[in-house]
Amino acid sequence: MSKPTPLSGFPEWLPPQRAIEQYVVDRIRSTFELYGFAPLETRAVEPLDQLLRKGETSKEVYVLRRLQAAAEDASDESLGLHFDLTVPFARYVLENAGKLTFPFRRYQIQKVWRGERPQEGRYREFLQADIDIVDRDTLPFHYEAEIPLVIGDALSALPIPKVRIQVNNRKVCEGFYRGLGLTDPEAALRAVDKLDKIGPDKVAELLTETAGATESQAKACLRLAEISAPDTSFESAVRALGVEHPLLDEGLAELVLVMQAAAEHAPGLCVAELKIARGLDYYTGTVYETQLVGFERFGSICSGGRYDNLASAGNERFPGVGISIGVSRLLGLLFGADALSVSRPVPTCVLVALPTDEQRAACDRTAAVLRRRGIATEVSPSAAKYGKQIRFAERRGIPYVWFPGSDGAQDTVKDIRSGTQIDADPMTWTPPAADLRQQITRP
RNA sequence: GUGGCUGUAGCUCAGUUGGCAGAGCACCGGGUUGUGGUCCCGGGUGUCGGGGGUUCAAAUCCCCUCAGUCACCCCA
């Protein structure tokens, strides 16, 4: 077999990176559960028509086909890998509505797949950590204020830079555009979304070309998009533009509530950023995008929003609000920036040195005692010279080497970083807490 | 999916007009009858990303392809 090569967009980390990923997932999970989100996993595939219901992402969906399927057998071809966790969840809610109690809050941490051209922080297979809250018929607004608080807690518990959640409300933009007399708010939204990339002049051009805006309407759209505030002062700034529409009033009131809740529970976490639009078209209210402070060029590592029409069948309707942490993107980018590392590449805390092959059984017993006490231990692979065995530990970052006492003498344990070696009993010896497990560090 | 840039040892890289694949670090073996890091001796560990072509001769020139990355697109 010739040497295998990587597959574009399907990253595989080395053990240190995977250790960090598992740690991060564990922390995120425990924060989600602290807020009462229930665990959930959905299958990897969905019927294609479910996935394609929301348009644009369609060309990025991987479809399924049995290798041996005859050409005319299309039985599996109506299945595709999910590209996010919200759409499968909406399907799941409809399917299990009778067994769930509402409002229903769940978290889901799974791989998703998108057929995009990969680059740094963009993969074809990646891990998302998603929370959603859905209710039957109507979803109280206050959940839109809760979501960023959960995320703020989840992300600030991680060894990553500070985050800033940018918040906007689709009703503000749409109400403003309609109040302005524009008839295609979606097109206007898409144009404004490019503000950071192409600049105000190009956006104005786009607005006139694609959204049918006049020059003054385009200017007004830009003035709205420029508004940004760490508090509720955006409201008067919007009012000062003199545009009126009931939807605008509604959106502003909601955005004020989100910002007030954030100010009370997590000062500095949220910024009202009226240029935030979001690509996915199913959002109908609050939308979120999250940046790492100091790493803004990474783009959003966590986004979501309120959706009213994603899960509905007949006259049943389950509006929801949710957000998704791009775990793979977040970590891939931080790894690339050398901004995350781990104290040692293996979990092992103690290497039991092997004096002779005959003593392996005794060494295994010592290791077993240490393991029973929660200390990750492995026995040296061979009875090489002690110098070799110490190097074995050193190369792996294993902090302690355990030496069985010869001729009934006391065992000793050596901290190979300091070189200090002390008498030790496997029943009682305990390493400092910092050495017990791999530590995630941020240089 | 479209276009640009990049690809030589584990890492960082050098390699002239096409002429026997190199350096530093890392790594491996040995030197101290068994407790490492310093020191000494020895070792190149490589499908030059892969395949094809031109040529007496290709890391070098041409074509295709894969991967990484950037922009577009989209978005975690």
Image (cartoon, coloured by chain):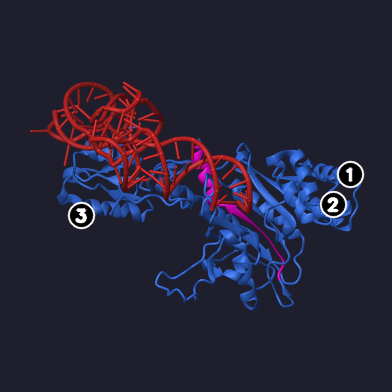
Under tag 3, what secondary structure? helix
Q: Are marks 2 and 1 in contact (CB under 8 Å)?
A: yes
> In the rendered image, what is the letter of the chain coloured red?
B
Q: Amino acid at mark 3?
A: Ala
Does A64 appear above or below B1?
below
Q: Badge 1 sits on which subunit? A: A
Say which of A311 and B48 sits in front: B48
Where's residue A433, x and y in %?
Answer: 44, 44
Give the residue type at disc 2.
Phe
> In the image, is A13 to the left or to the right of A401?
right
Tell me, yes or no, if residue A416 can be seen here: no
What residue do we see at 70% from left, 45% from top?
Answer: A194
Q: Would residue A328 be found to the left or right of residue A99 on screen?
A: left
| Residue under label 2 | A176
User: Label 1, on which residue?
Assistant: A241
Element class at badge 1: loop
The region drawn magenta spans A318-338
Is residue A277 in the magenta section?
no
Q: Is residue B58 found left or right of B6 in the rendered image?
A: left
Q: Residues within 10 Å of mark 3 (few under 14, many from 20)?
A: few
Examine the rendered structure and indicate whether residue A243 appears above or below residue A84.
above
Q: Which residue occupies 86% across, 55% down?
A: A178
Is B41 rendered above or below residue A273?
A: above
Q: Which residue is mark 3?
A: A361
Q: Which chain is blue?
A: A
3D distance between C-alphas at marks 3 and 1: 81 Å
Asked if labels 3 and 2 share a chain, the reply is yes
Q: CA distance from mark 3 to mark 2?
A: 77 Å
Q: Residue drawn 74% across and 48% down? A: A191
Q: Quadrant of the N terminus of chain A?
A: bottom left
